[in-house]
Image: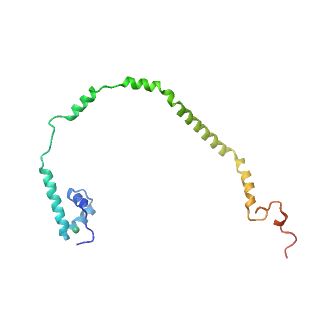
Amino acid sequence: MTEHAPDLPELSAYLDGELDAAAKQRVATHLAACPRCTASLAQLQALSADFRVLPGDSLGFDLAGVIEGRLAGAPRRPTERGERRERDWWLRLPVAVGAAASIAAGVFMGSALVSGGGATAPRMTAMRVFDTMPPGNLCIGLESCYVKGSLK
Ligand SMILES: [Zn+2]
């Protein structure tokens, strides 16, 4: 017995010819050495043969024609739907206004980002307070932050 044991769905697919060449070869190799899987395959073959022997049920008439006839005879209300669609157009007006406002705000903010380079300069100046070198480091204007005299 080899290391790979095909499970029941794989055996069924092997029986139905649905496996690719590599999987089919792998299952066939395993079946040649494994009597248990060979017995399972024989049971599947017997089951498949039993299903083929079962009589097929048929209605004796075309069910699609009956369904189409009933659908054609079913009461429809297309005019009522059309009237309602035309009558309730104003219910969708807030959605349209909101969408237009959202697009306008997006265009405005996008153009402000692209054209306004001045928005980043003040922020960079403010961030110098946190620099690790003396002009920054929260020491703007404090005498103690600056080196006095000469370094010897
Ligand atoms: Zn096996």
Residue at far right of view: 149
Question: In the image, what residue occupies the spot 46% across and 24% down?
Answer: 87
The image shows residue 7 at horizontal and vertical percentages of 25, 63
* Colour mapping: rainbow
Compare residues 103 and 138 and report the one nearer the observer: 138
Residue at far bottom of view: 152
Work out which quarter of the rendered image holds the C terminus and state it: bottom right
Work out which quarter of the rendered image holds the N terminus and state it: bottom left
Question: In the image, what residue occupies the spot 24% across and 56% down?
Answer: 18
Q: Is residue 147 left or right of residue 50?
A: right
Compare residues 73 and 37 and report the one nearer the observer: 73
The image shows residue 93 at horizontal and vertical percentages of 53, 30
Question: In the image, what residue occupies the spot 16% across and 55% down?
Answer: 48
Is residue 88 positioned above or below 102 on the image?
above
The image shows residue 68 at horizontal and vertical percentages of 25, 31
Question: In the image, what residue occupies the spot 58% across and 38% down?
Answer: 102
Task: Please state the quadrant of the image where ligand 1 appears.
Answer: bottom left
> What is the quadrant of residue 143 in the picture?
bottom right
The image shows residue 123 at horizontal and vertical percentages of 72, 52
Q: Is residue 99 left or right of residue 3?
A: right
> What is the quadrant of residue 25 in the picture?
bottom left
